[in-house]
Image (tube, rainbow, N blue to C red):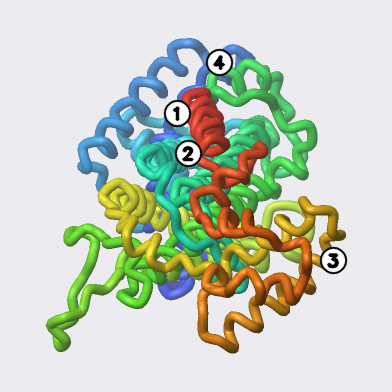
């Protein structure tokens, strides 16, 4: 029997039922649903709507329902439309008619909003923990490569030498912001809708503040119409995961490129590379290609939910039932992906020789311009002169340092014998020691800051 059958004389069409039912996926929220109901039973007992004995009977019954779910014994029956109806149906089977009192003043609208917020709060905390793990793996690699030099790129063209630690840590900070976003999302999710009724609020004297507190929420919703239809928290969670996905896809792309034999900068561990069924020599970075691809999926989950929310009339509409699968999918995706990315980073081998071999002196052209600047030339002019020097070296197919001093003097009489010192990659990197720079000295400070940041929250 459905819970709302009173005004109907015909049963629901079977195909509609299949479309309408959400039990297939929202059963994942059984724990939150039952916890919410236990708190609600106490709240309506305190308000004098049911007796203490009735509240106890309901709570005992709910404990049993929880145990059945925990043990994988809960049996879904026809008519169990969603997790809320399934729990109430089973409760009533177990404790009798008193089970039917639990829903007094409550609607599935405030119930589902409460359950889902509780679920997102837990999920966000779990993703946060996984992100912390990845951050720790990045720091550990960075610590070993403060003095490992590699080319830095802009426009994917060789630009300036950098330290490998600096490259690795760039992703640490992206993830730090992702974690901040999750924390912010949790803060706004921690608002309890229970006690909003279907839309207009509850006519019963339930202590909403106590209810919220018992469920671990920081606050109660200030407007019942908003409370039953607000899914901002779900959209924010999906945004945080989508942007995290974008960050992971960028890390993935670097790893794919740098593990390509043309680069050869890094080697993915055997356990995290895959072969080809046809070409015996192949060593593919599949996990990283999946990370890159999963970002698309996470973005899809976000845009899907936003499309559902757009233009909904006040207040609850069944469209909102579409909120959960997107969030579950995004969470599952993050949950499967992050441990693999963490392991890839943890087992990654950097090849310092190959990285250094990829450095070419044209990457020091900026430093050559800075050399002229130090001798009093305005940077714009220095830039132009060094451009000419680079062109001449290219014409002669020679490295910059191979150009005779006489040739250099032909471009500017500020060049002197000291110029040879410019062609030193380590020195070029070491000079960039201002906060946030690539120098090993600055990176040491960065590692300290990163450690403090992770330590704060793990
Ligand atoms: N399964 C529904 C959902 O996820 C629960 C709320 C149903 N409310 C309603 N008035 N039909 O949105």
Give the image location of residue 250, x and y in percent.
50, 63
- Name the N-terminal-most of marks 1 and 4: 1
| Mark 4 nearby-residue class (10 Å; few <14, some 14–19, many ≥20) | some
| Mark 3 nearby-residue class (10 Å; few <14, some 14–19, many ≥20) | few
Q: CA distance from mark 4 to mark 3?
A: 78 Å
Q: Tag 1's secondary structure? A: helix
Foreground disc of the pair 4, 3: 3
Residue 187: quarter of image: top right
- Name the N-terminal-most of marks 4 and 3: 4
Residue under circle 4?
45
Q: Mark 2 and mark 1 in contact (Cβ < 8 Å)?
A: no
Give the image location of residue 336, x and y in percent.
34, 54
96, 36: nearer the viewer: 36
Q: Mark 3 and mark 2 in contact (Cβ < 8 Å)?
A: no
- The residue sitting at 57% across, 74% down in the picture is 403
| Mark 2 nearby-residue class (10 Å; few <14, some 14–19, many ≥20) | many
- The residue sitting at 27% across, 73% down in the picture is 284
Residue under circle 2?
128
Give the image location of residue 354, x and y in percent.
33, 64
Residue 380's label in the rendered image is: 3
- Name the N-terminal-most of marks 4 and 2: 4
Q: CA distance from mark 4 to mark 2?
A: 37 Å
Residue 35's label in the rendered image is: 1
Determine whether, in the image, residue 15 is placed left or right of residue 176: left
Q: CA distance from mark 3 to mark 1?
A: 68 Å
């Amino acid at each position: 029997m459905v819970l709302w059958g009173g005004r109907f004389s015909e049963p629901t069409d079977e195909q509609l039922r299949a479309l309408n039912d959400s039990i297939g996926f929202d059963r994942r929220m059984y724990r939150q649903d039952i916890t919410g109901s236990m708190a609600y039973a106490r709240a309506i007992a305190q308000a004098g709507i049911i007796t203490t004995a009735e509240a106890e009977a309901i709570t005992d019954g709910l404990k049993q329902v929880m145990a059945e779910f925990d043990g994988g014994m809960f049996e879904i029956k026809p008519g169990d439309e969603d997790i809320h109806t399934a729990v109430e149906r089973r409760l009533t089977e177990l404790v009798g008619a008193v089970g039917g009192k639990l829903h007094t003043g409550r609607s599935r609208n405030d119930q589902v909003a409460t359950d889902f917020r509780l679920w997102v709060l837990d999920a966000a905390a779990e993703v946060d923990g996984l992100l912390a793990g990845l951050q720790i793996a990045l720091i550990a690699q960075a610590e070993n490569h403060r003095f490992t030099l590699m080319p830095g790129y802009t426009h994917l063209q060789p630009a300036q030498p950098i330290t490998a630690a600096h490259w690795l840590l760039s992703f640490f900070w992206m993830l730090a912001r992702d974690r901040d976003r999750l924390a912010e999302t949790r803060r706004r999710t921690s608002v309890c809708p229970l006690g909003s009724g279907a839309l207009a609020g509850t006519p019963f004297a339930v202590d909403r503040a106590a209810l919220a507190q018992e469920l671990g929420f920081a606050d109660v919703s200030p407007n019942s119409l908003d409370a039953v239809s607000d899914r901002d928290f779900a959209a924010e969670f999906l945004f945080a995961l989508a942007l995290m996905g974008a960050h992971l896809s960028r890390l993935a792309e670097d790893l794919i490129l740098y593990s390509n034999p043309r680069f050869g900068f890094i080697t993915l561990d055997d356990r995290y590379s895959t072969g080809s069924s046809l070409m015996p020599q192949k060593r593919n970075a599949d996990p990283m290609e999946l990370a890159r691809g999963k970002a698309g999926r996470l973005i899809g989950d976000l845009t899907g939910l936003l499309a559902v929310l757009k233009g909904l009339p006040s207040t609850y509409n069944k469209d909102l039932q579409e909120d959960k699968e997107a969030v579950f999918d995004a969470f599952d995706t993050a949950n499967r992906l992050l441990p693999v990315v963490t392991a890839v980073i943890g087992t990654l081998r950097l090849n310092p020789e190959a990285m250094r071999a990829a450095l070419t002196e044209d990457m020091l052209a900026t430093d050559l311009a800075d050399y002229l600047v130090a001798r009093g030339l305005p940077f714009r002019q220095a830039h132009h002169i060094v451009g000419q020097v680079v062109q001449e070296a290219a014409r002669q197919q020679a490295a910059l340092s191979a150009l005779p001093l006489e040739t250099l003097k032909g471009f500017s009489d500020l060049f002197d014998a000291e110029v040879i010192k410019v062609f030193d990659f380590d020195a070029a990197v070491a000079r960039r020691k201002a906060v946030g720079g690539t120098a090993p000295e600055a990176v040491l400070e960065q590692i300290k800051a990163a450690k403090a940041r992770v330590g704060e929250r793990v």
